[in-house]
Amino acid sequence: MVSAIDRAATRERLRRLIREIESRPSAPRPFVHRPVVADAPQLRFATEWREVDGALMREREYPAAYLHGAQSLGGGDIDGELLALLGGDDELARATASDLVFLDIEATGLGGAGAMVFLVASGRWESGGFRLRQYLAPAPPAEAGLLRQVIAACRTGSAEPVLVTYNGTTYDAPMLDARGTMHRLRMGFDAMSHLDLLKTVRRGIRDALRPHRLSHIEAVLLGLRRPEGEVSGADVPGWYFRFLRTGDTRMLTPIVEHNAADVLSLAALLTRLAAVHGRAEEGGHLERLLLGRLRARQGRIEEALAHLEAARGLTKSVGLRHTVAMESARLLRRAGRRLEAAALWREVAGGEVAAGAALVELAKHHEHHERDLERALAAVERALALRGPEPALLHRRQRLLRKTAVAAASGGAAIQ
């Protein structure tokens, strides 16, 4: 039987071994270009990238007026109030545009020990423009150098950087931290402040625009059309593996451009939302709907109602108009403006989308606030015809029938 002293000694030996392993510097193999043919694309790739810490890095700078789709990259209208609104996190109110680090990664898989990060794009607003940096691992051993460069870039220029990603809280940040652990690096991405614009889209326009893929969102909100036949996210690993087999840098060009476009889309999308936030009259129904729903989450009812009313007026979809009307009615009820809420319920009750829910709200309103049992009962009967014999509706009808009978027996007095 192993004694407590032996177990303690074993633990101490393991700790020393771990410290020794962590102290060893990693030594990735230097990248060696092996072009299949020394043609123009190969030569252009070689001149664009420079080697840093075993990985490759390139920089591109875009002026604020650069158009990504129909939207400039801008950045001047970004403030902490907007960031807190979009992120649903009051701590983001302390951030400024210069704190933002736009990030997108490409990996050989969704996770697990066999998946590596081989390409990362990061972007920041610097000196009145937008600077895009991309880091590439030309071979698996270069991943550690890539990760060191990425974390250094994120921490340079801001004491409290804020990540801006699309699904980054679920994928990008955890993946970077996991790969850092594999290389004995403490990345700390999960601990950084984070604005995940996919969550913003799902909160604000979840039912008004599908699917929620970035390529679809950017097409609708930014007017961006990616090049015909552009590599998809699902195909990215295959292109990288072909490069590893052949050394042909032409296999990298499509995924590098795809990666860069994703980060530019994040910056342009945030700029677009900032513009509508500051000049609401410029927004379309999707932007106004998004801002209205996010304001409602903050409890800023009047601002939310203004955005939602604008979204209702701008949309061509009857279904979305009725859905938004129901949301506005709930806010009006919370604000004690029941007559205005009832007007919206009547409007929705005359349509097909959400008519049943509107009739239920009208029944409650007629019963408890107008003391009109007959109109309440009529609304319930219509709701039953639409939604079928739901237990809650049947229970409400029975209660209203009892109240109506008692009122009739007592000479027509209203009974609560």
Image (cartoon, rainbow, N blue to C red):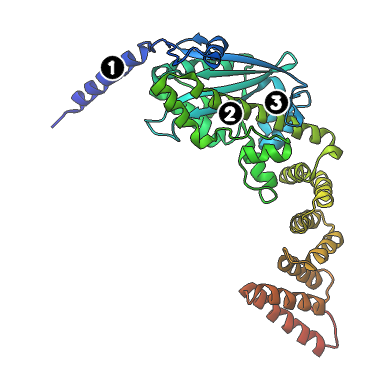
Could you tell me how far apart the alpha carbons at marks 3 and 1 are, in whole angstroms?
Answer: 42 Å
Whether the residues at callouts 3 and 1 have beta carbons within 8 Å, the answer is no
Could you tell me how far apart the alpha carbons at marks 2 and 3 are, in whole angstroms?
Answer: 32 Å
Q: Inspect the image, locate mark 2, and give the three-letter code of the amino acid beneath it.
A: His
Q: In which quarter of the image is residue 369?
A: bottom right
Query: Outermost residue toward the bottom?
Result: 409
Disc 1 designates what residue?
A: 17
Q: Quadrant of residue 333?
A: bottom right
Neighbor class of circle 3 (other Cα within 10 Å; few <14, some 14-19, many 20+) is few
Neighbor class of circle 2 (other Cα within 10 Å; few <14, some 14-19, many 20+) is some
Disc 3 designates what residue?
A: 94
Observer able to see residue 350: yes
Q: Residue 258 carries which label?
A: 2
Image spot of residue 41 (x, y percent): 55, 16
Q: In which quarter of the image is residue 401?
A: bottom right
Q: Inspect the image, locate mark 3, and give the three-letter code of the amino acid beneath it.
A: Arg
Question: Can you say whether 92 is above or below 33 in the image?
Answer: below
Nearest the eye: 246 or 50: 246
Nearest the eye: 326 or 12: 326
Image quarter hosting the N terminus = top left
